[in-house]
Amino acid sequence: MQTVHRSQITAELNSRIKAAHNVFVLTGAGVSAESGVPTFRGGGNSAVWKGLPFDVISSAQMVQRDLPAVWEWFDYRRGVLSGLAPNAAHETVAKWQDRFPKFTLVTQNVDGLHTKSGSRDVVELHGNIWRTRCISCNARFEIPADGPRPNDCQNCGDHLRPDIVLFGEMLPTGTFELAAEKAAECELCFVVGTSALVYPAAGLPEIAKSAGAYVCEINAERTSLSDSCDAVLTGKAGELLPMLDQL
Ligand code: OAD
């Protein structure tokens, strides 16, 4: 990965950050990469599970067809996550909620690391791997980090599934609407560590931009979003975000 150069930070980005009152941050798997969480695309090692591509094993059809296999995959992912800690990127984002008068954090990540680093009111577009949901009554239950995962709903006794938005499923009611409303209100939008390929999440920077925000992408590589961003910083989120925080 390319070394981060401070020269990527233009005078305009510098002054936008200093003047910002309403900041919106959208994060993806790349923000957790330096914590050791594999990304989905771009060389991550979790893209295939027992011969099944992640978008097959993480799909609504697979919950119908083979719920134990879905659990096997998510149990494995929770196992990977259980020993991991937030990194400097999560920590900087957590600081920003107190730096800027208005601040919104929207994540596509299900790993819970933003909350673990102190971020409050995180809008989790794709759910959380540390929660289960009943397939019948939708009751939600936390999964303890150090205890057994509950199998059956304590409410109605039916099976539990991961409380994650899987391929082929809609986002939870109101979640995207809230994120879109905040994106449309912000002056400065950061898009951090996402390939920006999965909609509707990838549409949020476009909403911010068309409502007049200055959009800055932070990613290890260019994405399909880069050409429409006002600033593109190429490098590690865990280096670039703390650098921006020093401005
Ligand atoms: P991807 O795995 O598609 O993209 C990760 C992005 O992070 C890539 O663009 C990398 O270049 C970038 N990246 C990697 N390491 C980085 C670092 N240290 N600093 C900055 N950037 C880095 O992940 P997402 O875009 O989050 O959905 O994927 C979107 C959704 O696809 C996920 O939420 C998941 C998956 O299906 C669900 O789980 C429902």
Image (cartoon, helix red, strand yellow):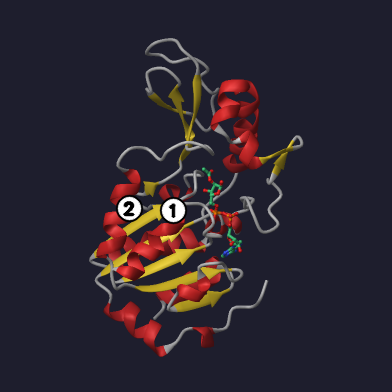
2 w.r.t. 96: above or below: below
Query: Three-letter amino acid code at disc 2?
Result: Ala
The answer to which image quadrant residue 70 occupies is top right
Q: Residue at x 36, y 56 (%)?
A: 105
Q: Position of residue 9 (x, y in %)?
A: 47, 84
Q: Give the alpha-carbon distance from disc 1 to disc 2, as whole Å.
A: 9 Å
Q: Residue at x 64, y 33 (%)?
A: 73
Q: Quadrant of ligand 1?
A: bottom right
Discs 1, 2 touching: Cβ within 8 Å? yes
> Position of 6 compared to 204: left or right?
right
Please give the residue where the numbered disc 2 appears in the rendered image.
Answer: 179
Distance from mark 1 CB to nearest ligand 1 atom below 8 Å: yes
19 w.r.t. 98: above or below: below
Q: Residue furthest right?
A: 51
Query: Three-letter amino acid code at disc 1?
Result: Ala
Locate the N terminus by quadrant. Answer: bottom right
Q: Secondary structure at mark 1?
A: helix
Please give the residue where the numbered disc 1 appears in the rendered image.
Answer: 201
Q: Residues within 10 Å of mark 1 (few under 14, many from 20)?
A: many
Query: Reading the chain from its start, which is encountered first: label 1 or label 2?
Result: 2
Q: Residue furthest top?
A: 157
Q: How many marks?
A: 2
174 w.r.t. 97: above or below: above
Tell which of 137 and 91 is nearer to you.
137
Q: Position of residue 233 (x, y in %)?
A: 52, 76
Q: Position of residue 22 (x, y in %)?
A: 26, 67
Q: Is residue 121 visible?
A: no
The answer to which image quadrant residue 53 occupies is top right
Q: Residues within 10 Å of mark 2 (few under 14, many from 20)?
A: many
Tell which of 173 and 235 is nearer to you.
173
